[in-house]
Amino acid sequence: MKSNNTIAVVGAGISGLAVAIALQKIGTHVEVFEQAGAFKRVGAAINMTPNAVKVLDGLGLGKSIRSTAHIPPYRISRMWDTGLETSRVELGDTAQKRYGAPTLLMHRADLLTALEGSVPPNFVHMNKKLIRLKNEGNSVILSFEDGSSFVADGVIGADGIHSIVREQLFGPEAPIFAGMSAYRSIISVQLLDGKNLNNFVKWWGPTPQSQIVMFLINRGKEFFVFATMPEVSGGKESWSKEGDIGALRSHFGKFHGDAKAVLYACDETLQTALYERNPLSRWSEGAVTLIGDACHAMMPFMAQGAAMGLEDAVVLSRCVDTSEEWSTAIRRYEGTRIERTSKIQLGSNQNEWLREAGNPNWVYGYDAWRVTLD
């Protein structure tokens, strides 16, 4: 693609920063526009499976993300009442040998910090809330709430599940409330002294809406607990809303003792409503395309939401690097990615991933740096 083209990225989350880094590595000029006033340490933990870690390694972030992560030896599924183990997937050194990267369990903020540190700050514009964009042939005009505007040769909408870019392209379509909320807690491992915490463990409840996931982060110094339970009505998605720890303990009161012991070690929790979307048949219009949650927001039950955005970033940059025109590049990118992300999006929403013994190779073994482009 022409080296003097300027690409605007709307959104400075995981997908937006990753695609900015990937495009800069091939010499593309990128400007990132973020509605927040500053980067903040928000969120809780995140599971970076081998396919995601391979992306981050290729972006040059491998050392940074490993410095605060925990590498689990196994991913284990257990039944809520009996504690029976229903599946076990080898991770650790086995994943490194099999897939070329391990699984890394870490704080989401540590991942964002690593990404933020790889984008020159003069290319990231804060307090830029997009209100409108206009496709004009081979260029796009972005208009912001503060009255400013920017003209780009191409635009990437990386602005999440409530994407303004997506709405501008395809019209309003609200995300669907999934009928449940998620609760997130981080506790000191000292509160669980003597327990075997090394593995990633998912407790499967009596219904798909009730489950608990737990694993170590921060090089084994902290323990993350993620639980979902049914809710009658939706609310806002939030990284900071305080949840009712008593209601959480009560809902899981009949779970196995190993699971309850962890919940009773939690003094506080954060709550967010969960929303989902159905797969799109296309992601692009004119000189604008979508990436990450903006085009395939999914439930967290396969731990692939961020991973899909990271894969998108690499594939898009490779399409740009091997195409003469931006329009050709985004068509190739869309064609390469839609089938995979749609399959994972639907699988995540169904919440059956590795409940029983299964083969995760088709997910973990994907290499965005080498996959054949459309």
Image (cartoon, helix red, strand yellow):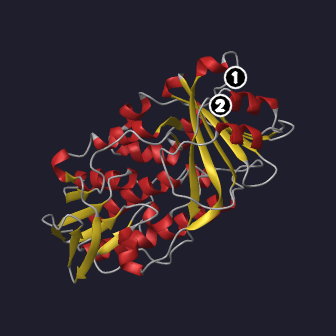
Q: At which x and y percent is residue 339?
A: 54, 69
Query: Which residue in the rendered view is the most extreme toward the bottom?
Result: 137
**Pointer 2: what residue?**
199
Residue drawn at (19%, 72%), measured in percent from left and top? 153
The reply to whether residue 372 is visible in this rendering is no
Residue drawn at (54%, 42%), measured in percent from left and top? 242
Q: At which x and y percent is residue 289?
A: 35, 71
Is residue 70 toward the left or the right of residue 132 in the image?
right
**Pointer 1: what residue?**
196
* Amino acid marked by disc 2: Asn
Q: Is residue 249 above or below residue 339?
A: above
Q: Is residue 212 above or below residue 13?
A: above
Quarter of the figure that contains the C terminus? bottom left
Whether pointer 2 and pointer 1 mark residues with C-beta atoms closer than 8 Å, the reply is yes
Q: Residues within 10 Å of mark 1 (few under 14, many from 20)?
A: few
Is residue 25 toward the left or the right of residue 19 in the image?
left
Q: Is residue 55 above or below residue 308?
A: above
Q: Residues within 10 Å of mark 2 (few under 14, many from 20)?
A: many
